[in-house]
Image (cartoon, rainbow, N blue to C red):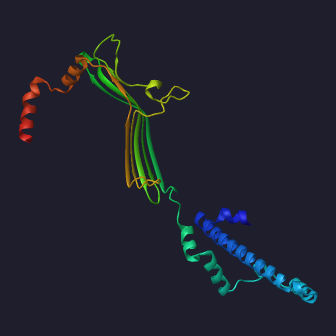
């Protein structure tokens, strides 16, 4: 029957009934302890004569233990609550309150791999000027009863040059993955520590501050030469035939 109720009742109802059961158990144990102490005192007081011991033993055999056999009166309940410093209404209200680390909502979005490239098409043949590749772009939002946190991370980031043929340094920007520099590498050879990480937390659970902002970025290696810089500037520069029209639009806008 108890197992069936666990499947039928909600989580809040189970916590409510369990809190009531625990409070009643504590009250019964405390009352039984007090009754046993009173009984021991009475036995010590009546131990002087053999007649009193005889009649006292007969009375004890017929007396029912109220801690387990009868209902507790309101006066006994109030006295026991005063001894235990227990507030039944507060206990019932607290049983409905979720713990601080309970999750109310959790949203995670992740893009495993992505790329962005600039290409030109001279003579009908597409040529890549520069391209950017990133790994595992992840955004996460967590909400709890008393706080929330939001984080964004990027595990890998690389930039490739397409303007120089047969170059030894096609990868002009990369994240350093050397273990000596502090990066954590898993058994599969993948970097566990992200390249870029930002986290904002409101009212953190450890109460170290009201709001917390964490930002981390690992070391990068960048190889520079003027070829790809000029190619990027040329890509975004309009043709000379349209340059006057663009300048006129800019003047009109301001």
The quarter of the rendered structure image containing the N terminus is bottom right
The residue depicted at 65 percent of the width and 87 percent of the height is 75
The quarter of the rendered structure image containing the C terminus is top left
x, y percent for residue 159: 34, 24
Picture quarter containing residue 69?
A: bottom right
Give 133 or 86, whichever is nearer the viewer: 86
The residue depicted at 84 percent of the width and 82 percent of the height is 43
- Residue 83 position (above or below residue 139): below
Picture quarter containing residue 16?
A: bottom right
The residue depicted at 65 percent of the width and 65 percent of the height is 8
Picture quarter containing residue 146?
A: bottom left
x, y percent for residue 18: 65, 68
Residue at the outermost front position: 48
Q: Is residue 241 left or right of residue 172?
A: left
Q: Is residue 33 left or right of residue 219?
A: right
x, y percent for residue 48: 88, 86
């Amino acid at each position: 029957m108890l197992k069936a109720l666990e499947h039928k009742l909600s989580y809040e109802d189970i916590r409510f009934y369990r809190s009531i059961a625990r409070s009643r158990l504590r009250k019964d144990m405390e009352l039984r302890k007090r009754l046993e102490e009173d009984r021991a005192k009475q036995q010590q007081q009546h131990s002087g004569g053999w007649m009193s011991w005889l009649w006292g033993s007969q009375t004890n055999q017929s007396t029912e233990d109220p801690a387990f056999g009868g209902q507790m009166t309101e006066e006994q309940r109030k006295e026991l609550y005063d001894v235990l410093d227990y507030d039944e209404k507060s206990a019932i209200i607290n049983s409905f309150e979720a713990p601080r680390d309970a999750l109310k909502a959790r949203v995670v979005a992740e893009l495993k791999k992505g790329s962005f490239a600039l290409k030109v098409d001279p003579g009908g043949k597409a040529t890549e000027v520069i391209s950017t590749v990133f790994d595992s772009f992840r955004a996460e939002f967590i909400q709890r009863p008393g706080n929330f946190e939001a984080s964004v991370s990027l595990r890998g980031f690389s930039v490739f040059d397409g303007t120089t043929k047969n170059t030894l340094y096609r990868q002009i920007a990369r994240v350093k993955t050397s273990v000596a520099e502090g990066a954590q590498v898993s058994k599969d050879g993948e970097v566990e520590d992200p390249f870029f990480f930002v986290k904002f937390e409101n009212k953190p659970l450890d109460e170290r501050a009201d709001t917390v902002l964490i930002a981390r970025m690992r070391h990068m290696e960048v190889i520079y030469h003027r070829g790809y810089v000029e190619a990027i500037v040329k890509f975004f520069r309009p043709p000379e035939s349209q340059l006057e029209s663009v300048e006129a639009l800019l003047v009109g806008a301001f």
